[in-house]
């Protein structure tokens, strides 16, 4: 538990799935974690799991689309751990539909959660990061910080029935490249991970009750058709969907010191899928 000892990591959507796997992985390496989920119970469970490992964590429960969430998220890290070293914008969901049947609200919801929410978190982090970097430079210290935005192969390659989700996830690639240029002077590496088909509740079969999630008190149908699941062995060179732990591994690469000279990049974690 030394590779990330003393680092403070904020991970949105870390009460379940990929975010949870990443939180535990970073905690095992010594990072202190600010855990976020819509619901208190899964966030508290992850905090407990990290403390059981001998690590340290605190929950910041809430919807990332709330106007004040970014400030609250960053403030939690500063006030609790007096640091801000790793930001992973992982929270999100899908709300599929073909273009001719999609209303403005359905389209906007994907922009809000996948684009506006990460923007607000980064905006809230900007001044603390500037001040930390200034203090470190004055002391002759070199400290690299990491930001990882979570995109999707729907954003890098497009996906029928997901014009809202694909558009939002594509925007994160541009956000990554821009922020890597703005924050390079502060020694912040900003990268993007685009997931392929990963086993989470968003990729359960449509008839699986677990594919229904609750957002803002409303039930949302996520999941994918069984036909898509059946086609995975032929579509994915590695022959299967990835696990949450494998997906978290792709993000982890951008959080550790070995990637200190990697910035502005998009890594596809998709089992070999390239088109």
Image (cartoon, grey):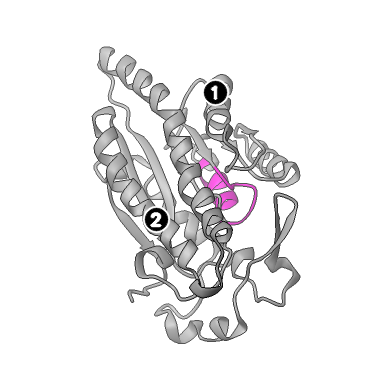
Which SS class for mark 2?
Answer: strand
Question: Is residue 192 placed above or below 201 in the rendered structure?
Answer: above
- Give the overall secondary structure of the magenta segment: helix
Residue drawn where x is 46% and y is 76% of the image: 160
> Is 140 on the left-hand or right-hand side of 1?
left
> Is 143 on the left-hand or right-hand side of 88?
left
Residue drawn where x is 48% and y is 63% of the image: 164
Residue 260, visible in the rendered structure: no
Magenta residues, as a range?
A: 12-26
- Tell me, yes or no, whether the highlighted magenta stretch contains residue 46: no
Disc assigned to residue 81: 1
Q: Position of residue 12 (x, y in %)?
A: 55, 43
- Tell me, yes or no, whether the highlighted magenta stretch contains residue 22: yes
> Is 181 on the left-hand or right-hand side of 227?
left
Disc assigned to residue 193: 2
Q: Quadrant of the rendered structure where residue 50 is?
A: top right
């Amino acid at each position: 538990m030394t590779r990330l000892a003393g680092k403070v990591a904020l991970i949105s959507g870390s009460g379940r799935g990929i975010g949870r796997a990443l939180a535990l992985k970073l905690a095992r390496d010594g990072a202190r974690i600010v855990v976020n989920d819509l619901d208190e119970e899964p966030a508290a469970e992850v905090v407990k799991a990290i403390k059981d490992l001998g690590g340290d964590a605190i929950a910041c429960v809430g919807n990332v689309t709330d106007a004040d969430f970014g400030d609250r998220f960053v403030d939690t890290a500063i006030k609790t751990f007096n640091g801000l070293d790793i930001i992973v914008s992982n929270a999100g969901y899908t709300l599929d539909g073909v273009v001719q049947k999609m209303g403005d609200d359905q389209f906007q919801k994907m922009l809000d959660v996948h684009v506006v929410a990460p923007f607000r978190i980064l905006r809230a982090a900007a001044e603390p990061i500037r001040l930390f970097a200034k203090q470190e430079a004055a002391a002759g210290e070199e400290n690299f910080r990491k930001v990882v935005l979570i995109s999707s192969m729907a954003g890098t390659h497009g996906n029928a029935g997901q014009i809202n989700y694909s558009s939002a996830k594509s925007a994160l690639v541009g956000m990554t490249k821009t922020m890597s240029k703005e924050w390079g002077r502060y020694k912040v590496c900003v990268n993007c991970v685009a997931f392929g088909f990963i086993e989470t509740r968003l990729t359960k079969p449509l008839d699986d009750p677990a594919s229904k999630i609750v957002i803002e008190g409303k039930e949302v149908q996520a999941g994918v058709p069984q036909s898509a699941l059946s086609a995975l062995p032929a579509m994915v060179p590695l022959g299967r969907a990835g696990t949450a732990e494998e997906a978290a591994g792709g993000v982890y690469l951008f959080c550790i010191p070995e990637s200190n000279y990697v910035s502005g990049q998009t890594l596809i974690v998709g089992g070999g899928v390239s088109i």
